[in-house]
Every structure is written in C-alpha cells, then in structure tokens.
Image (cartoon, helix red, strand yellow):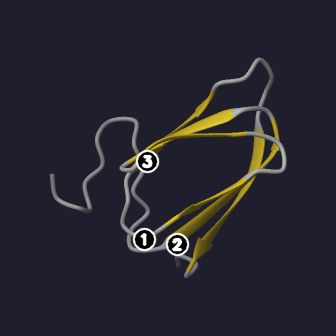
Amino acid sequence: MPEDEARPGEYWMGPIEETYYCIRGQLTLFCDEGEIEFGPDDAVYLAPGGHYRLKNTGDEEAFFVYNLYPPSE
C-alpha cells in the first residue's frame, strides 16, 4: 500500500509529527508498531508517515488533545 493511502478506519495526516495527550478515558492507538493503550495524563508521540486508528476502549467518553507539527494549512 502506498505510504499516503490509509485503510478504512485509519488516518494518515501526511509527513507530520503528531502528539496525543489523554485528559479523560482510556484509548487504544493501533499503529504500524502495534497497539498502544493510554489513559489520563499519558501522551503518545507518532513519527511522521505512519498510519493509525484510535479507539475508545474505556467505559466513559474519552477526551484528548492532539498536536500536529508542522501545522496543516
């Protein structure tokens, strides 16, 4: 699969760095490297170019903040 194509349910934001910071809830990030489970006060960094899928795996609504660098136009 070409690097710039995502499978159904996956995201590909392009060659950018991404950081996710969980405020509330439990999340699982499925990415090229495997699965990453994270929750309140955890942060996850994604290097440029990867494909991923994010899923709420907790019993409550999840709330997270994310950052993209460089910012998209």
First-in-chain label (2 vs 3): 2
Disc sitting over residue 48 in the figure: 1
Left or right: residue 67 compared with residue 60: left
Are the two marked residues, 2 and 3, in contact with CB atoms closer than 8 angstroms? Answer: no
Left or right: residue 34 compared with residue 28: left
- Residue picked out by circle 2: 17
Are the two marked residues, 2 and 1, in contact with CB atoms closer than 8 angstroms? Answer: yes
Tell which residue pokes out farthest to the top in this image.
59
- Residue picked out by circle 3: 52
**Residue sitting at 32 percent across and 36 percent down?**
8
- Residue 32, position in %: x, y? 36, 49
Q: Toward the viewer: 30 or 10?
A: 30
Q: CA distance from mark 1 to mark 3?
A: 11 Å
First-in-chain label (2 vs 1): 2
Disc sitting over residue 40 in the figure: none
| Disc 2 packing (10 Å; few <14; some 14–19; many ≥20) | some
Q: CA distance from mark 2 to mark 1?
A: 5 Å
Amino acid type, callout 3: Tyr
Amino acid type, callout 2: Glu
Q: What SS does tag 3 mark?
A: strand
Tell which residue pokes out farthest to the left in this image.
1
| Disc 1 packing (10 Å; few <14; some 14–19; many ≥20) | some
Amino acid type, callout 1: Pro
Please, is residue 72 above or below residue 11 in the view? below
Please, is residue 68 above or below residue 20 in the view? below
Left or right: residue 59 compared with residue 3: right
Q: CA distance from mark 2 to mark 3?
A: 13 Å
